[in-house]
Image: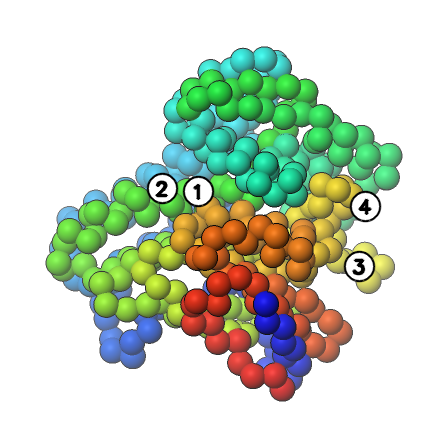
Amino acid sequence: MKTKSKVAGAVALGVLLVLFWGCSSSKEENVLSEQWIFFDTIVEFKIYGNPDERTADRIFGTVRGEFARWDSLLDNYDSTSAIEALNQADAGSIRVAPDFGRFLSECEKFQRETGGVLLPNIGHLTKLWGIGTGKKWIPPKKAIDSALALAKGGSFYVVDDTLVVATGDLEIDPGAFAKGYAVDRVYEKIYPLCAGDERIDGFLINAGRNIRGWHRKRKFNIGIRNPRGSGIVGVIQLPPGVACASAGDYERYFIKDGVRYHHIFDPSTGYPARGANASTVIAADALTADALSTAAVIMGKDVKKLVRRPDIEIILFFAGDSSLNYTIIGAERYKVDLGDSD
């Protein structure tokens, strides 16, 4: 584990992943790009190389269609979505579509492996606070305790890909898992299309700072933005196939009486997490990076308990009045340039 401090200087440093990104070579390369809105964020897909128009349209259409499918399945504010249908169902055995069942299995796995730090049924709290919906209030403690009791009292168990057993009052919020899971599903569909076409050098998926890509010749330069201010605080040289994701208190939040209240909640308290201000996680798959980036903000340095694979590296950021401290936990196998201490 490595700990350093970077003092905020003349260049203000701001939010987190990703301000710039591209290939690590200075040689110019043809890039095709499209953007859409899914999961309430900007999703961008880039193709490197020179495919013909028909091939590019097919690839972009596949990416757009896969993201749209998962967005529709996992939108817990849409009464017609699969996840909201599960939330509204009576307790007991519930039949679900196989792909949705596999997603729920992953959520259940991360809840178990983190000891409940990642709690899929956290929706009772997120909807109570309403951060990101225009609300700027601190709920009464009695209401928080009540929502927390519902969150911990409701649960689900995935029997197989099509059968889920639900207990208590479900209000599943897939925010810690959805974008990373969707990125992996898109990667699986797109990789054979691109790798099998010699006119295509690579591709890159960026779903709201959940990033994974592939390139024949190069790594990707992923710029890390700091939780406070503007600008880049560091760069990751991301190998082909590897993913990274970021989470923190810098996007959906409000400040009251000098305290920042944000959208990542600690299920042990019912209040916004205080473990770290932000985190960036590098891992072999986007789901792991997405889930652990949220867990790291909740747990802070205790997240090292969850680093059980050699491919995982976690960068924690702690923002002070005039400085930004960071700690690196895990593999340190990737090239991450966070600069020298000032």
The residue that label 2 is drawn on is: 185
From the viewer's side, name the closer residue of 220 and 136: 220
Place residue 65 in its image quadrant.
Answer: top left
Residues at circles 4 and 1 in contact by the CB criterion of under 8 Å: no
Image coordinates of residue 206 in percent, x first then y, are: 41, 55
Question: Dot 3 lies on which element?
Answer: strand
Residue 103 screen position, x and y as percent:
46, 33
Q: Could you tell me the amino acid type at mark 3? A: Val
Is 178 situated above or below 6? above
Disc 3 vs disc 2: which is toward the camera?
2
In 3D space, how far apart are the residues under numbered discs 2 and 4 (Cα atoms)? 37 Å
Q: First in sequence: mark 3 or mark 4? A: 4
Give the CA distance from mark 4 to mark 1.
Answer: 31 Å
Sequence-wise, which precedes: disc 2 or disc 4?
4
Q: Mark 3 = which residue?
A: 259
Q: Residue at 39% across / 65% down in the picture?
A: 238
Marks 3,2: beta carbons within 8 A:
no
Q: Mark 1 points at which residue?
A: 181
Q: Residue at x 50, y 31 (%)?
A: 104
Return the residue at label 4. 138
Q: Residue at x 45, y 37 (%)?
A: 71
Residue 216, numbered circle: none
Q: Which of marks 2 and 4 is in front?
A: 2
The answer to whether marks 1 and 2 mark residues whose Cβ atoms lie closer than 8 Å is: yes
